[in-house]
Amino acid sequence: IGDDLSLEEELVLAGPEKTDSGQTSISIAPLPPPSYGAQEKVATRQAFGTALQKLGEVNDQIVALDGDVKNSTYSEAFAKKFPARFLECYIAEQNMVGAAAGMAALGKIPFASTFACFLSRAYDFIRMAGISQVNIKLCGSHAGVSIGEDGPSQMGLEDLAMMRAVAGSTVLYPSDAVSAERAVELAAKTPGIVYIRTTRPKTPILYSAEESFEVGGCKVLRSSDNDQVTLVAAGITLHEALSAYDILSQENIRARVIDLYSVKPVDKATLTRAAKETGNLLIVEDHYPEGGLGEAVLSALRDTPCNFHHLAINELPRSGESKQLMKAFGISASNIVDRVKQIVSAG
C-alpha cells in the first residue's frame, strides 16, 4: 500500500460489473416466421443460417463470425448478405471467441459458429467470457455420431457438458428447422452466453410456424393418461424417439415424448410431472453420458422418486453412415424400443 493511504482505508476489490443490472431480455424486432413445408426435411444448421440472416435484416447490431466452415454452419447466408458485419476467423477458434467478446463489449450482438467439437479449443475464452458476463452467442454444428462418415475427431460429443458448465450460460438444442429459427431469435434476446447445438442431417419439420418457444421450456409431443414411460430427447434423438413411439404404440405400449429443447435451464415442472405420472424416464442423447441431457434431467429431478434410464454414446465411436452409427452406439429408434420393453417388462 502506498504511503498516501492510511491503515484505516480499505482496499476494495471489485468483481465483474453487469452492463445492464437485472436485465432479463434484449429488445429485438420480431423475425418473419419460419416458412417450411410440412413434408420438408431441413437440417437445423441450415435453419440457423436462415434465421441469422433474418436477424441481420431487423437489427444492424447483429454481427457474425465463423471458423472457416461457414458453408457447413450456414453462416455464409449472413456473410453474403452483410459482408461488412461478418468476420472470417479461419481455424483460430480462440481468436474467434475473443473477437466476439470484444464486439459484445462495443454493444454488438455477435453470433460465432463452428463445428461443436472445435469450440473445445476455445473453452478458456468461453469460460472467461462467462466470468465477464459477456453477451455472446455460440453455435456448434455437426454434433454427435449422427454426423456420420467424418469420424470421431469431428463429432462433438462433449459440447453440452462444456457449455452447461459455463457460469450464467443458456443452452438450446433445437430438433427441427422451426425450433432452430426460434432458438436463434431466443439467443439474440437472451443476455449473456447462449449456446445453440445444431445437427448435420436433414430432419422432418415438427412444428408449425406459429409455435412459440421459451428459455427454460420444453414440448410434450406425445402423451396419454396411461403412459408407462417418458422418452426425453432433443435434436436428432427426438426424431428417433418419435419413431420408437410409433412402433411401441402398435404393441400397445404407451410412451410420453418430450422435446427438451432448453437444456439449460430445463423445464423442471414438466419433467417432474412426467416422472410422477409415468414412473420411468428414458433419456436419449447423441452425446457422451457425462454432462449432457441425462445429467441435466437427473439434476433437476434429484428429489423426485423415479426410475431413471439413459441411452448415450458410451464408447469411442467410429466412422460410418449416420443411421448405422446411431444404431451401433445405442441411440436409434430400435434401441429405444428394446430398452422400453425391458423397462415395461421389469414392472
Image: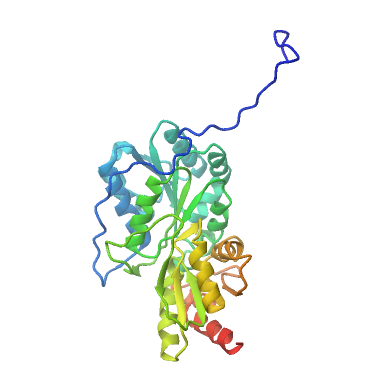
| Quadrant location, the N terminus | top right
Query: 343 above or below 189?
Result: below
Q: Would residue 107 be found to the left or right of residue 335 on screen? A: left
**What residue is shown at x 58% (from left), y 89% (from top)?**
345
* Residue situated furthest right in the rendering: 7
**Color style of the picture:** rainbow
Query: 103 above or below 181?
Result: above
Q: Is residue 148 visible?
A: no
**What residue is shown at x 44% (from left), y 81% (from top)?**
225
> In x, y percent, where is residue 65?
40, 43
**What residue is shown at x 45% (from left), y 90% (from top)?**
252
Numbered disc total: 0
> In x, y percent, where is residue 232?
49, 71
Looking at the image, which is closer to me, 103 or 83?
103
Looking at the image, which is closer to me, 82 or 205?
205
> In x, y percent, where is residue 218?
43, 63
Looking at the image, which is closer to me, 13 or 48?
13
